[in-house]
Amino acid sequence: MKSNPVGSGATRPQEEPGEDTRVHIGRQPILNRARKIFGYELLFRSGRANTANVIDNVHATASVMLNALNNIGISRLIGDKIGFINVDDRVLDSGIVELLPSKMTVLELLETVEVDERVLALCAQARRNGYRFALDDFVTYDGAPEDMLHIASYVKVDLMGTDRKDLPELVRKLKRHNLKLLAEKVETQEDFEVCRDLGFDYFQGYFFEKPSIISARSISPTQLVLLELSRILAREEEFFVIESLFRKNPELHIKLLQFINSAAFYTINKINSIGQAIALLGYRKLQKWVTLLLFAGEGPDARSAPLFERAVIRGRIMELLASRITRDTSAADMAFITGVLSLVDALFQAPLEIILTDFNLSEEINGALLHRDGVLGKLVSVIETLEQENYDEMETHLRDVNMTSTDLYIIENNAIIEYESMSGM
């Protein structure tokens, strides 16, 4: 007797995204002297309200980075401009900033950081890696760490906290260090003209534009999964051990594909399997990426969503089918990733063709997902008709790949048993 397929029904369920599935980021433009956009400051936002409510700097920076690199995409946020991101010494020490593309990033050192030898060494190392620094909320030259002025490329002068009569002397002293000066909290036309005439290079403030809020839906791996992955990476386990954890957790699978196609880790290699994606990233960057997820507080239990269960089972059914049909391991790997991603539009509740731009997938996988092309596309159709209980059409697709419904039911049962076993259900 045939098993009851997971999530079977006439149509794929569409889950309403709650507030906890949305992520938000603030973005405020930074203009040059010609009032053209030079870059953007990316700001922590915990909700749709245009306020920061920062309790912990590490969490705030990690959230901004994760949303920029994974959930929204840094190229969508800043295009070909420069992104300014707040950091403190703990963020620098963690190494997660190395996930950001150095040519597109300015690290904005918070005014709360006490600059000592350790901080100077961290900044110097980041500079050697190609990152530039800005000093945030600068209000007076007196007491400024001279060594940091040599390391920084930009100084952000806080107009609200600086006495206007002191501005000319402050500018003169800072210009001796060959620094670019950025006037922040520019509120009026007069503010802009005064700062421009004094020689400021860049400008930011409500006079030009308030920070805008950009939102996207996020899929969050569980904290336990991330901690387990972190331990595995720390022990430098074999790649197949790491890959097996990803295969059990489609939310990790999807996030990794998003990240590996971001500007921070652009690769011309088309992705055919999750193992290939892990190998391209390597232990070191993978560890930093997991650390970023943990710092950002990625934790809601994604396994409570039935779509994740179906994604894993779809992937395994397609893998077993492809293995039976082709006897080719690489084809089976491609089938697994195709099966997992065949539900990604429902997970993100957005058109598939838009979502797939976030993944650097092979043409074969893209064709299967978008147009049901090739053997992979035929296998997606097999599973869809199985779940919809459209058995006549299912039989037609099976004949096209020289399989029978009996073969499919056995494979489906095996996939479900494997899933329940590895989930501890």
Image: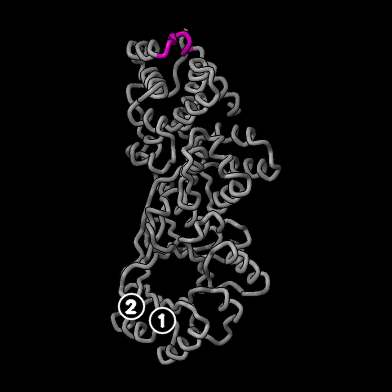
At label 2, counting other C-alpha atoms closer than 10 Å, the crowd grade (few under 14, some 14-19, many 20 or more) is some
Lateral position of residue 303 relative to residue 354, left or right = right
In which quadrant of the rendered view does residue 244 lie? Answer: top right
Circles 1 and 2: CB atoms closer than 8 Å: yes
The percent position of residue 333, horizontal first and vertical second, equals: 52, 27
In the current view of this chain or complex, which residue is farthest to the left?
A: 189
Lateral position of residue 358 relative to residue 332, left or right = left
In the current view of this chain or complex, which residue is farthest to the front?
A: 268
The percent position of residue 14, horizontal first and vertical second, equals: 35, 33
Q: Mark 1 — residue? A: 159
Is 289 situated above or below 113?
above
Quadrant of the snapshot with the C terminus: top right
Is 192 situated above or below 212?
below
Residue 187: assigned label: 2
Q: Which of 366 and 233 is in front in this view?
A: 366
Secondary element type, mark 2: loop
